[in-house]
Amino acid sequence: MKSFLPTLLLASLLLISKAHTEEVLLFQDGKAEMLNDKLKFFHGSWKFAEGAMLGEQVPTEKHTATIKALIPFDRLKVEWKMKFAQPKETFLFVAWPADSGAHAIDFTFNPDTGRFTIVRPKFKDLPRAILTKGKLAKLNTEWHELVCIHDGALVTVTIDGATITARDESFSRPMGPFYLNGGGFNGAQFLIKDLRITSLQ
């Protein structure tokens, strides 16, 4: 019996390790000049620079520079770092539902003020609503570290260690792709690196 226990423990640890490894769906450090096939530069002019993916808003598009993730935002943890090349610009995270082109989950971030929110977009007879707000204690951070988690009706956003959480039943439905929109307009730029997507399934 004694000789069997170490073997059983080792096998269990190997299974746990394998399961953990398989949870990571995507990692893009931003340094390699080849985009993962589950990502798409959706709006703006993008290039690999400064060890990251650098997006610049194209004025004729009238849309912030955007990365689209071709993975349903359904029970996921998304982590990344981002830097704004110009101050007083904004960031908008958007997840779409699986069955339409409307917004399903939003969160906003203003790096100049440090304020961020989780938003429920308009859903059926429910109006658009800011569900919760947060604010960073430190505003002079060059690279912001973000984590966004979707787990059924719960959405949690952490920016530079500050965390907010919102629960809404509209979040508990099949999700489609999600988008990282940032930099603002008039040719504004922002950078993204170390993008990691992990399944919570």
Image (cartoon, rainbow, N blue to C red):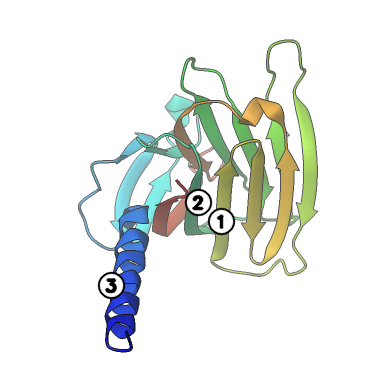
Pointers 1 and 2 in contact (CB under 8 A)? yes
Instruction: Identify which amino acid the numbered label 3 is placed on.
Output: Ala
Q: Position of residue 20 (x, y in %)?
A: 37, 62
Residue 55 in the figure: left or right of residue 64: left
Where does label 3 land, which residue? 11
Q: Position of residue 100 (x, y in %)?
A: 49, 15
**37 or 172, nearer to the observer:** 172
Look at the numbered disc 3 and give the secondary structure of its residue: helix
**112 or 125, nearer to the observer:** 125
Closer to viewer: mark 2 or mark 3: 3
Residue 184 in the figure: left or right of residue 26: right
Where does label 1 land, which residue? 147
Residue 48 in the figure: left or right of residue 171: left
Residue at image coords 51%, 42%: 75
Look at the numbered disc 2 and give the secondary structure of its residue: strand
Instruction: Identify which amino acid the numbered label 2 is placed on.
Output: Lys
- Sequence-wise, the earlier of marks 3 and 1 is 3
Residue 166 in the figure: left or right of residue 20: right
Q: Is residue 185 above or below residue 55?
A: above
Q: Residues within 10 Å of mark 3 (few under 14, many from 20)?
A: few
Can residue 50 be seen here? no
- Sequence-wise, the earlier of marks 1 and 2 is 2
Cα–Cα span, label 1 and label 2: 7 Å
Instruction: Identify which amino acid the numbered label 1 is placed on.
Output: Val
Look at the numbered disc 1 and give the secondary structure of its residue: strand
Closer to viewer: mark 3 or mark 1: 3
- Sequence-wise, the earlier of marks 2 and 3 is 3
Residue at image coords 79%, 47%: 133
Cα–Cα span, label 2 and label 3: 27 Å
